[in-house]
Image: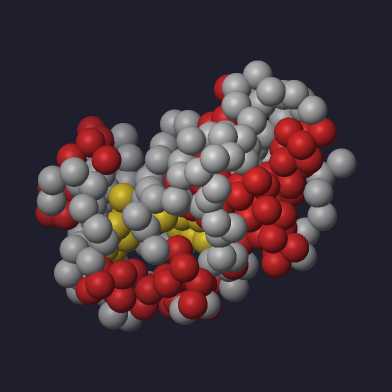
Amino acid sequence: MFAPDFGLANAVHPAHNHEPRRGGVKPSILLLHYTGMSSAAKAIDWLARPESGVSCHYVVDEHGEVTQLVPEELRAWHAGASSWHGETDINSHSIGIEIHNPGHQHGYPDFSHAQMRGLIALAQDIVRRHAIAPENVLAHSDVAPGRKIDPGEKFDWHLLAKEGLGRWVRPHPVDESDEGLGPGAQGPNVLDAQKLLRSYGYGIELTGTLDASTEKVLRAFQLHFRPARVDGRLDRSTEITLEQLIEAAGKRAAA
């Protein structure tokens, strides 16, 4: 057992899979997941078992109750193959929160109000103690495009931003007549979008072609910042929302 880092934690359930953060780094990313399991209790049990090959720092159940599994000073195994701003050891650089939701394969219900309030209290405490930048409050899908889609398009990033958590801009409205650019499209619009996505942190090559990798990153961006239509296409709504996000974050397009 260990003392919880979050003073309002409801329980501690130590997980087996953890280790020191590599290179002695301090956490600079708060990474949000959903459990994808039928109950929070089952998720906590599985995440704590050695044979699972995974773990996380916290689980927030549907009632907003918080269970800590791994001390924040240690490296939990929650991100998998992932990258952000070129860093591929996201586990060493992050604190991982699993929010209970059965996920897309099991009906994908809404996240409850009580659950979001519990998450916000936890996340505010973590961000304050570790001085995590707004643009580093991320979805699992942001750091693992195409491989992961959680916490998904129903997750209320706008609410988190209003509570001082994460970066958010109002998505530009979707024009249903604008199909946008699809797989194989080439040109300056694609290259400009790739540069902006890369400058924000997404792992993407500057090819000028809307290849399979770029489509996955566009979907990840849309899941987080333009959830009204998640299709991996480059339409004006996506372009404008991306431009506004980069401006709000004070970043420059990658060269």
Q: Is residue 24 visible?
A: no
Image quadrant holding the N terminus, namely bottom left
Q: Residue at x 50, y 72 (%)?
A: 161
Q: Residue furthest front?
A: 177
Image quadrant holding the C terminus, namely top right
Q: How is the image coloured?
A: secondary structure
Q: Residue at x 28, y 80 (%)?
A: 8
The x, y position of residue 49, in whole percent, is 21, 42
Q: Residue at x 82, y 55 (%)?
A: 252
In the figure, 244 relative to 202: above or below?
Answer: below
In the figure, 161 relative to 238: above or below?
Answer: below
Q: Is residue 27 shown left or right of residue 4? A: right
The x, y position of residue 100, in whole percent, is 23, 55
Q: Can you tell which quarter of the image residue 245 is in?
A: bottom right
Q: Is residue 63 shown left or right of residue 205? A: left
The x, y position of residue 11, in whole percent, is 19, 69
Q: Is residue 178 shown left or right of residue 6? A: right
Q: Residue furthest right?
A: 255
Q: Is residue 131 visible?
A: yes
Q: Nearer the viewer, residue 244 or 85?
A: 244
Q: Can you tell which quarter of the image residue 207 is in?
A: top right
